[in-house]
Image (cartoon, helix red, strand yellow):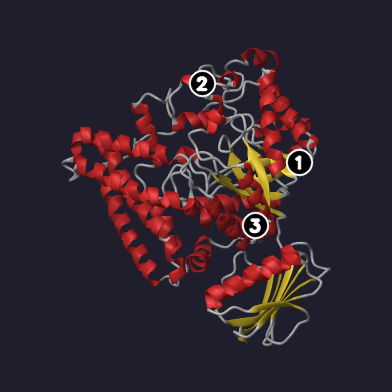
Amino acid sequence: MYLIPAPSKMTIRKEQGYLLRYNGRIVIDKECGLQATDHAKLLKKDIQNKLGFGLSITKGEREEGCIFLGLKKDLKKEEYRLEITEDRAEILGGSNAGILYGIQTMRQLLETRGAVLPCLIIEDLPDMPNRGFYHDATRGRIPTMESLKALADKLAYYKLNQLQLYIEHSFLFKDFSEVWRDDTPLTAEDILEFDIYCRNLHIDLIPSIASFGHLYKVLGSKSYSGLCELPEADEQPFSFYGRMVHHTLDISKEESFAFVTKMLEEYMPLFSSDYFNLCADETFDLGKGRSKELADKIGVNNMYIDFVKRICDFVIAKGKKPMFWGDIICGMPEYIKKLPKETICLNWGYAPDQSEKETEILEQAGAVQYVCPGVGGWNQLINRLKDSYDNISRMCSYGFKHHAIGVLNTDWGDYGHVNHPEFSTAGMIYGAAFSWNKDIPDFDGINRKISRLEYGDASEKFLLNIAETGIRTEASWYEIVCYKEMRQKRIKGTPWAPVLKEISWEKVKDTNRFLNEKIAEMYHILSEAKQEKRYLYQAYIHAAEGIKLWNEAGAVAVFGEEEKSAGIQAGELAASLEYWYHEYKKLWRSVSRESELYRIGEVVFWYADYLREI
């Protein structure tokens, strides 16, 4: 049975028993409110798209042949019961959320079974109460409203109930015009509209904003550079690498706290959520610059926790429960007791073999925590699916073992968010599946199901193909960016990981031959996939072609004149990169605002010019 997440309990009585007929009806119990009608419309639309006919919607009693929607008081809020007999289908929920989740399961049955459905009983509820997705809407891509709503639809389809959008500078704050003037920021009206949209899908849209570290663009502005821990922040040229490792607030200045609270007071009221994520992660420069005197006096740990506590207290005074990233507190867990009891620690870790240690430490320290894995897409063109699966399955299991109250699966945009947002879908589904049901399926099994449900792939091979494609990279986007910035002297010191040290022409040739085979397989799968799903494949094929080009560009950059003996013409490669970017722009603009597309272009053009010089 192709259901994601897997139900808690399912009994199949007959493989083919219920015929969903064109003249049937969707009947809503008279006790249900207006929201149940919206959910019924969602089911009606899906039946129309999949089967070619639409059922009428009414309110009343159960009737033969109908799909009946109702509430059942003894079920928990997100619990549902789906029963399909030869006479009718019945979805009962503990609330409207339960009804919606039952409908989503029904939609997945329609995806693979069509109008002939099995007779069965499903009794289902989540193992983890808070199941979220975290999407970077700052460092590279700012989504269009259409793509944001499509994301919310997909989260609801896989029964996720929280969403956070990461914001540093990409909101149109009233007094920050020099920060967003070259961007296409989200507006207050956008947030208000999207909050309502999410709420109707039982998704809590939780505000998340950098309030301590990672304030690169804000603290690099003329008006606010004086609040940066390191001086002369406004005089530094742009650097993808520098954006990741610098720009922490100088909290020895009272103006810094005033700056943060001003941001929060403008941003917070736009959300109906009871939570607020103040971030406060990776404060790398704390105590190393303008606040060194204070650091010498009270210590960096005390500086950190005192400032986080002040923000938490402010958030609580506004009626919200604070959240913050746990990377700093894990190194000083005893300080967790200094924070208000309402505070939630977001315990992140993204390695395939991620240690259990941090989750255990936070539990022992008394922290209320979410575990926060990642979809493995940043710094590369195609997400590393096996790494993502390993990481998410581990972190979810740690969360259950150490009594976490939520899972927040992250999708970051480091180094420009070069990968298409669609590529995070599989990782998002892993998080949805493993947080709803703690019995984790094997890698091949879950990917076969996703290939069928999400990509309409009857062969069930698509994601397994993508998993192999994404790891065959000889010049990662991180390396491509860092090599450029090192040549431009925009990186001080040694980058955190090697840059093009392992590349060779032999490896590039072998890898690109392999990628050509995988691209051919994608075309074969595309040709057999469901018509309405085929649009999802283009971005993968385009990205795989890009990996080949960047593999060659990285090798030419390192070996120079040797490209001739390798059969590569640098000038032709430069033109190929420019044509590739031309198509890339179309894909970007199909889901994202203009935002920082030009920065991706700057990388492409630098390499094209560099190759022509060679």
Say left or right for 499 vs 277.
left
Quadrant of residue 438 within the rendered picture? bottom right
Picture coordinates of residue 226, whole percent (x, y): 58, 18
Name the residue at the left extreme. 565
Q: How far from the left and from the top, in percent, is residue 121?
A: 70, 77
Residue 202 seen in render = no
Q: Earlier in the sequence, mark 3 or mark 1?
A: 3
Q: Along the polypeptide, which appears first: circle 1 or circle 2?
A: 2
Report crowding for label 3: few under 14, some 14 to 19, many 20 or more residues within 10 A (C-alpha): many
User: Dividing the image into 4 quarters, which one contains the N terminus?
Assistant: bottom right
- The residue that label 1 is drawn on is 321
Judged from the image, the secondary structure of the residue bearing numbered disc 2 is: helix
Q: Earlier in the sequence, mark 2 or mark 3?
A: 3
- Residue indicated by mark 3: 160
Q: Is 43 displayed left or right of 222 in the figure?
A: right
* Secondary structure of the residue carrying numbered label 1: strand
Distance Cα–Cα, label 1 vs label 2 = 33 Å
Label 2 near label 1: C-beta < 8 Å?
no
Question: Camera-side residue: 417 or 288?
Answer: 417
Say which amino acid is labelled 3.
Leu
Q: Is residue 546 above or below residue 181?
A: below
Residue drawn where x is 42% and y is 58% of the image: 466
Q: Nearer the viewer, residue 119 or 351?
A: 119
Q: Which residue in the protein does label 2 denote?
A: 233
Q: Is residue 7 visible?
A: yes
- Type of the residue with mark 1: Lys
Q: CA distance from mark 2 to mark 3?
A: 39 Å
Contact flag, marks 2 and 3 (Cβ < 8 Å): no
